[in-house]
Image (spheres, rainbow, N blue to C red):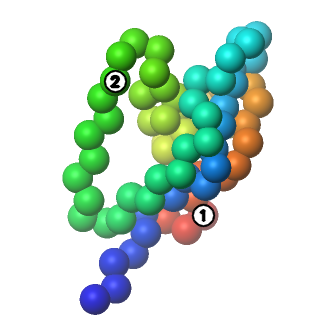
Amino acid sequence: MHVSMLIKFEGVSFKYEGSESYAIRDVNLDIRRGDFLLIAGMSGSGKSTLLRMMNGLIPHFYRGEMVGRVLVDGM
């Protein structure tokens, strides 16, 4: 059975403009259609950054240094 990839993070790191440290570093993640995903963590652990990358706000509306790539539905 073929399960299609919905979201893929490949070696993704992001540092917000003006910040000295990375919000997320070297994230590799595959989310397939039908997967259940829970994002939890302490304040400042990168949850919002991860979601902003999934919906395209990063890098289009938040400035910073991004490494790697995020594919959503193959794009």
Q: Sort mark 2 into few (<14), some (14-19) or many (20+) by Cα contacts within 10 Å.
A: few
Identify which residue, 60 or 13, lies in the foreground: 13
Residue 75 drawn above or below residue 16: below
Tell me how many marks there are. Answer: 2
What SS does tag 1 mark?
A: loop
Residue placed at 26% from the left, 40% from the top?
A: 38
Q: Position of residue 39 (x, y in %)?
A: 32, 35
- Residue 57, label in figure: none
Residue under circle 1?
Answer: 75
Q: Position of residue 69 (x, y in %)?
A: 66, 52
Residue furthest to the front: 26
Residue 75 drawn above or below residue 45: below
Q: Is residue 61 found left or right of 40 in the rendered image?
A: right
Tell me the quarter of the picture where residue 56 sits.
top right
Q: Return the disc, 1 or 2, that comes first in the chain's sequence.
A: 2
Kindly identify the amino acid type of the residue bearing the numbered disc 1: Met
Identify which residue, 42 or 5, lies in the foreground: 42
Kindly identify the amino acid type of the residue bearing the numbered disc 2: Gly
Residue placed at 61% from the left, 34% from the top?
A: 25
Q: Position of residue 7 (x, y in %)?
A: 46, 57
What SS does tag 2 mark?
A: loop
Residue placed at 65% from the left, 37% from the top?
A: 13
Residue under circle 2?
Answer: 41
Pick the quarter of the image with the C terminus.
bottom right
